[in-house]
Image: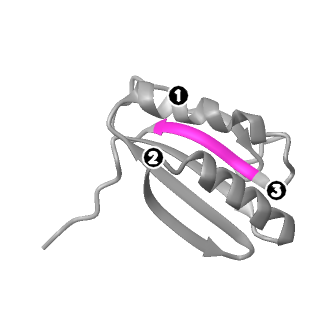
Amino acid sequence: MSLFRLPDYEVLIHIRYNAFGKKLEQDILQEMAAFNLDESAEYQGVKDYHWAFESWSEATAAGERLRRYVDNPNLLVLRVKANYDESIETISHKDLIGPKPVT
């Protein structure tokens, strides 16, 4: 029996999947073509992508490459995270989906 294991380090994005989001998707996939696409899914008008990396420095460098897209309203999430090293804090370049602050 094989258990699903998240990559040690990853860059993940969520894109609003409409006509404009599809253009953004093409641009990002071209930008990230050299990296290992680990997973992709589409649900409720959103498409997400996860790229796997063997080191934190590789993941953060890839996340920096995508920062130029953060002003695009169709990019909802851009996050770099370490899934197993609790000493490393997640970098959220953009998060319009995450939990809302309690007021």
Question: Of circles 1 and 3, which is in front?
Answer: 1
- Residue that numbered label 1 is attached to: 61
Q: Identify which residue is drawn at 63% across, 33% down.
A: 65
| Horizontal relation, residue 52 to residue 5: left or right | right
Q: Please name the predominant secondary structure of the magenta segment in the image.
A: strand
Q: Choose the circle earlier in sequence order: 2 or 1.
A: 2
In reply to whether residue 78 is colored magenta, the answer given is yes
- Per the image, the residue denoted by label 3 is 74
* SS for dot 2: loop
- The quarter of the picture where the C terminus appears is top right
Where is residue 88? Give x, y as percent.
44, 25
The chosen color scheme is one colour
Rendered position, 14 above or below 101? below
Residue nearest the viewer, comparing 44 with 13: 13
Magenta-tinted stretch: 76-81
Q: Which residue is label 2 attached to?
A: 35
Alpha carbons under labels 2 and 1: distance apart: 11 Å
- Looking at the rendered structure, the kind of residue marked 2 is Phe
